[in-house]
Each structure stands twice: as C-alpha cells, then as structure tokens.
Amino acid sequence: MARSFLLRELRPTLSLAAPIVLGQLSQMLMGVTDSAMIGHAGAVPLAASAFANNVFNIFFIVGVGLMIPVAIFVARARGAQAPAEAADYLRHGVALAVALGLAETLAMAALAPWLDRFGQPAEVVAIVRPFFLFYAASLVPVFVHLALRQFAEAMGHPWAPTVIMLLGVGLNALLNWILIYGHLGAPALGLTGAGLATLIARVAGAAALLAWLRRDARVRAAWPAKWLGDFSRARFREMLGVGLPAAGMLLFEVTAFACSGIMVGWLGAAPLAAHQIAMSCASLAFMVPLGLAMAAGMRVSHAMGAGEAARLRPIALGALGAGLAAMAAFATAFALGRGLLAGFFVDDAAVVAIAAQLLVVAALFQLADGTQVIAAACLRGMSDVRVPALITLVAYWVIALPLGYAAGVRGGLGATGVWLGIAGGLGFAAIFLTVRLVRRTRAAA
C-alpha cells in the first residue's frame, strides 16, 4: 500500500516537473549557448564570460530566493481554494522583483569599475566590463519573469512559460550569431555582443510571459485586479520570512561556486575557461533535479494548504528517487564522455584537458547535488527554512571553500582540487538535509 501511495504521488510530480525541467534546461541552454559561441571567439572571451557570470550569479541568486515564496504561497492558496490570495501573493512578488532588480542593477554598475580587484588575468578584465553591465541591466526582466513563471507553475500551468523560454533560447542564439560575429551587417562586438543579445532576449521573455498570463482564462480568477497601491507590510513580511532564508541557502551555495571560480581564476585563463566549460555541463544536468525540486516543493505546499499531511512523505521520497536516477545517468555521461563534451566548447587543447578532469569530479558529486536540492525544496514547501539554511552555510563555507582552497590553491591539485572541495560540501548538504526531511515528514504524518 505504501509503495502504491508513493507511485501515485510520483506521477503528478513528474507531470508537473517535466515542463519545469524543460524550462530550466531552456534557461541554462541560454548560458551554454553563450559559452559555446563565445568560446569560438577565443579562450580569453570565454574566461571573461565565466568571471562575469560568477559575480552576476551572486546577485541573481538573491532574487531567485526571494521569488520562491511566490510559488510556495500561490500553491498553498490554490490548495486552500483561495484565488484572491494567490493574486495578492503574485502582486507582492512582482513588486519585490522590480525593487530588488533595480537595487541590484545599481549595485552591479557601482562594482563594474572595481572588477580588477578580484585578481583575475589582465586580459580578462580588459574586455569584461561592457558584458558585465549588460548582464546587470537584465536583472529586472529576469526577476519579473521568474515571479510570473513561479505563479504560472504553482497554478498548474507550466507549459506556456516553458515554450516562451525555449523561444528565448532561439532568439538569444540568433542575436549572438549576429552581434558576436558581425553577421547581417552588424558590427562584430565579440563578448559585448553576447551581453547585449542576452539582455534583449530576457526582456522579450518577460514581456511575452506577461502578455500570455493576462489573456489566459485559466488563471483569470487569480490574476491581480490592480498592481499598485494598498501593499501589505504583513504580506511582505510573510514572504520575506520564507524568501530571505531561502535566498541565504541558495546564496551560500552559489557564492561557494562563484568563489571557487575566482580561486580557479588565480591559476590562469586556461583553468578558468575549463572551469566555465565544466560548470556549464554540471549546471545543465542540475536543471533536472532542480525542476523536480520545484515541482515537489509546490506539491508539498499545495498538500499543506489542503490539510493533507499524509501526502508529504510520498511526494518527497518519490521526487528524491526520480532525482537520483536522473543524476546517476548524468554522472555516467560525464565520466565516459568528458573529452567529447569539453571539445564541444573550445578548440584549445590545454583547456579541453583540464575541463575533462573537472568533469570527472562533476560525475562524482551528481547524486549528492540532486539529493540536496530536492530535499531543500520539500522543506521550503513546509516553510522549514532556518535549519536548512544553517546546514548549507556549513556545507559550503565551512567545508567546500576551505577544502577547495587547501587542495587546489595551496595543495597543488589546481582546478581539480577546488572542485573536490565543492564535492565535499555537496555531500554534507545532501546527508543532513535528507535526514531533516525524513524527520519532518514523519512528524507531520
């Protein structure tokens, strides 16, 4: 009976997760497309894009965390059959998205003149600023798009956001082709052209999703009647109560990866370019458990709103099992196809050799990476965020970064040593988040 209950809950999780995974893959494909197309312009532009992305991701992930409550609370309101509440959560979420995006754009613009202080190669710093500023300008549309997508998915309609993101990947690739290499009469802008292409594609994606949601009759009851005025401090506090710890969890992880990238940059342009290649592959694989995690978190929150606590553990365990199966497949692909994958991005033999080594380490931590993100999302769906935030703090800042520095920078293992530190942190997070999830779902049932 328990196995039948688990399988019964797994099917709707996979049904919801499928378009979310495809959407997440589409979002990552934009970055992978950038890396591949920039890589064919040279190793130095690829290294510069890696550096800019490492810094950008610190700002980006704060917004991702603060938008998570949109999905959680909209799903909970939907479970409680309260569409007016769902609309109010969306309205407050979009307001947070705009305010945060503007603040972070200004912060990145203020940081741009000081990028040389990060100790990166001089040839990287010399070309990175325009690309970095275009990425900064894309934060508002990125966060608005994220809030709208979270709303659509939590309302059970994930396919339109997915299609829009896929179209965005195609638009970004076309604009890259035009602006990086100078086709159709455009100037060859190189790395700067890639930044401009990404900005245009992100603005178009947010506008298209807003236009679709305004016209979709299936979400009309939960669509805000107005957007400005009568904001509730209590509503903002409620959302920030979940969003800030969630942002902290994501920030601890992403800053650990970003700082690892900066440490790799101390080793030279070739290791940094290899790091970007391996990170692109690992990040692309990560979109599968991330999509499962988002679906499971929304379904956990929906069950909480409907007062059906007995469903929490089957939802969580089913998602964990599916995530482990997917990540085992990616681990095998990375281990066996490492040279082929690295060669797809760049022709530089030295960069390919280092990237192939990093992909072996990536293969080692795939299972842990998938487990920790799904467990964390299910806990967030139960509004359990503070202890998981502490677990991630220890995993990435007490274990991953010191271990990576000791093994890679001081110990002579180079970029591979830095990545081994990441693997250690992910393993710690996977174990302790899963233990907490098992305990919390047992208590809820």
Image (spheres, rainbow, N blue to C red):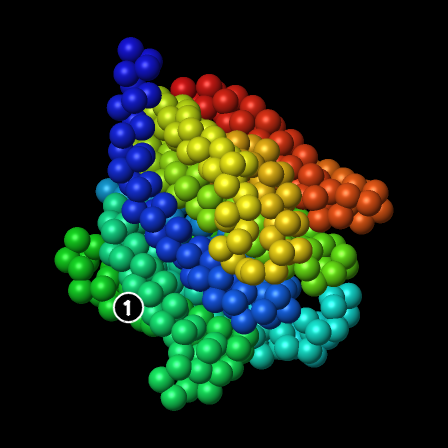
Residue 233 vs 102, above or below: the answer is above
Residue 128 vs 35, above or below: the answer is below
Query: What's the residue at 69%, 51% (across, down)?
Result: 260
Q: Residue 342's x, y, as percent?
A: 54, 51
Q: Residue 338's x, y, as percent?
A: 54, 43
- The image quarter containing residue 169 is bottom left
* Quarter occupied by the C terminus: top left
Query: What's the residue at 60%, 53% (across, down)?
Result: 352
Q: Badge 1 is on which residue?
A: 208
How many other residues sit within 10 Å of disc 1, few (<14), some (14-19) or many (≥20)?
some
* Quarter occupied by the N terminus: top left
Q: Residue 174's x, y, as percent?
A: 36, 72
Query: What's the residue at 29%, 22% (across, down)?
Result: 7
User: Does residue 326 appear in this view?
Assistant: yes
Residue 223 vs 260, above or below: the answer is below
Residue 372 vs 86, above or below: the answer is above
Taking the image as shown, residue 192 lies to the left or right of residue 297, namely right
State the residue in front, 221 or 336: 336
Q: Residue 344's x, y, as percent?
A: 49, 55
- The image quarter containing residue 77 is top left
Looking at the rendered structure, the secondary structure element under dot 1 is helix
State the residue in front, 68 or 256: 256
